[in-house]
Amino acid sequence: MDRVTIAGIIIIAVLVIGIGIYAYQGSIGGPQDKVLMVATTTSLEDTGLLKDLEAAFEKKYPSVDLRIVSGGSGIALEYGKKGDADIILVHDKTREEQFVKDGYGTKRIPFAYNYFWIVGPKNDPAGIKGLNATEAFKKIADDGGKNPSQVKFVSRGDNSGTNSREIKIWNQSGLNYNGTVKNATWYIESGKGMGDTLIIANEKQSYTLSDSGTFLAFQGNVTLVPLITQGKSLLNVYSTIPVNPEKVKGVNIDMANKFAEFLVSKEGQDIIANYGKQKYGQPLFTALYGQPEPT
Amino acid sequence: MNEILEGIRQAVELIVTLNPEIVEITTRTLYISLSATLIASLISVPIGGLIHFRSFKGKRTLINIIQTLFSIPTVLVGLLVFLLISKQGIFGSYNLLFTPGGMIIGQTVLIMPIIIGFTISALSGVKKHINDLAISLGASEFQTIYTIMREAKYALLAAIILGFGRAISEVGVAMLLGGNIRGFTRVITTTISLETSKGNVALSIALGIILLAIALIINLILNRFQEK
């Protein structure tokens, strides 16, 4: 036998074994009624919360294969509209309500909240500590305009829930987001998830807006500190929306509903309420336990 | 610097102890990229042969287009296939998006131009007199093609291995079509991207070492064949 034949046999053998393993797991395409596609905002995935929820849910329903795709809330909503996800987990109330109103979602179900934090370098070059969110953004814009080498702001720039909140705050600060802010030299768009954006902001020693959960989970990797952590405009509510099978065909609504029920059940809420206590010294999310969402 | 050294130390530990996550991700990566390479080869080598052995109008242009597609951005292939296999796409009903099957399709499309292009080069590299000799010895067209293919077998294998190298090292298709689902579509490159963004350097370095080791093995095989 020459070498080509031997190499060919090896390649084919590996392939056959590989296909065998995957066929065994029934995962090449597989029966779709047991698959639940979940599209989630990055913060729930990056903090690790979803991993725990997934494990508990799959333990409760052993036949279900939960598959989680993580992206910004904007992408998650798009996956829902296209039918590529059966249920979405997002944090962007305005767009969520629109999603349900347009018939793509059956119901918006809030299940947890925390806060957006304005984080920045320890020495706080724009001196925003103690201000409220809108004042702080105004101050960053003013000082950034004067001294862009010292005062910078990193934006997600990815149409995510955090990004849309950030834009809302810029507009509330009386600044023209699309004109002044977006084109300013001190304003940097990362185009990435929250974790990446924190790393970038850290490298550039810039300010950024982060959900508190991701920040706490990444605290060990950055020298940035939370500067503003409270205020109505920083409230961050996470909701789940099962995709409406009447509008989007092919949705596994039974499993989607089961997962939504699980999230707001005592079991699911306990996991959320306790998540991060051990590792980060404080819980990353506040579970709602059936209470209406704070506004 | 310390971070890198510490990362490498942990990485070696992860590899030596056969960390289950690393084994799982590496197996999946090999399975997906090898499948894509096999399918792409079965389609592309005959297409390359067809283009080489037939003369037709626009052949030069076609070859130019194929060569341009060597450097098609992986995310562009990802996007095109995404639109086709998303639930609202033409092949939406096959439920291929965010599955290993979808990734195999994407990588197949990605590396087909490379295998076709290098198949044509491989066949062009066979001396003209072998062609003439085969014909003068009374070989049929099929036999002539077979003889030339045999003559070019090492160059053909190199074409296939190049395709495999591109498939296993790309991240755009894997990310867009696989969705980086833990335990299902997460492969070496997408894990490196994710874990680095999470600040988990050790796992990234470990997978980076494995990817490099695979590249090294491929290169050694390739070199041995080319020496012949």
Image: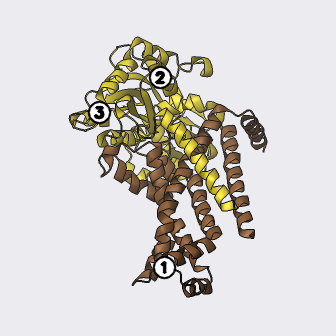
- Residue B136 % position (x, y): 56, 88
- Locate residue A31, reporting x and y percent: 37, 34
* Image quadrant in which the C terminus of chain A is located: top left
The secondary structure type at the circle numbered 2 is helix
Using residue A95 as the reference point, say whether residue B20 is left or right of it: right
- Above or below, A173 against B52 in this view is above
Q: Give yes or no for contact between labels 2 and 1 (Cβ–Cβ under 8 Å).
A: no
Please identify, in this view, whether the residue under mark 2 or under mark 1 is nearer the observer: 1
Q: Chain of mark 1?
A: B
Tell whether label 2 touches label 3 (CB within 8 Å): no
The yellow-coloured chain is labelled A
Distance of mark 2 from mark 1, alpha carbons?
A: 63 Å
Question: In the rendered structure, the residue with mark 3 lies on which chain?
Answer: A
- Label 1: which residue? B141
Identify the secondary structure beneath mark 1: helix
Tag 3 residue: A243
Element at label 3: loop
Q: Which mark is residue A53?
A: 2
How packed is label 3: few (under 14 Cα within 10 Å), some, or many (20 or more)? many
Marks counted in the figure total: 3
Q: Position of residue A219 (x, y in %)?
A: 62, 31
Q: Quadrant of the N terminus of chain A?
A: bottom right
| Residue A105 visible to the viewer | yes
Q: As drawn, is A288 to the left or to the right of B110? A: left
Depth check, front residue: B138 or B118: B138
On the question of residue A223 being in view, the answer is no
State the image quarter where residue A279 is shown. Answer: top right
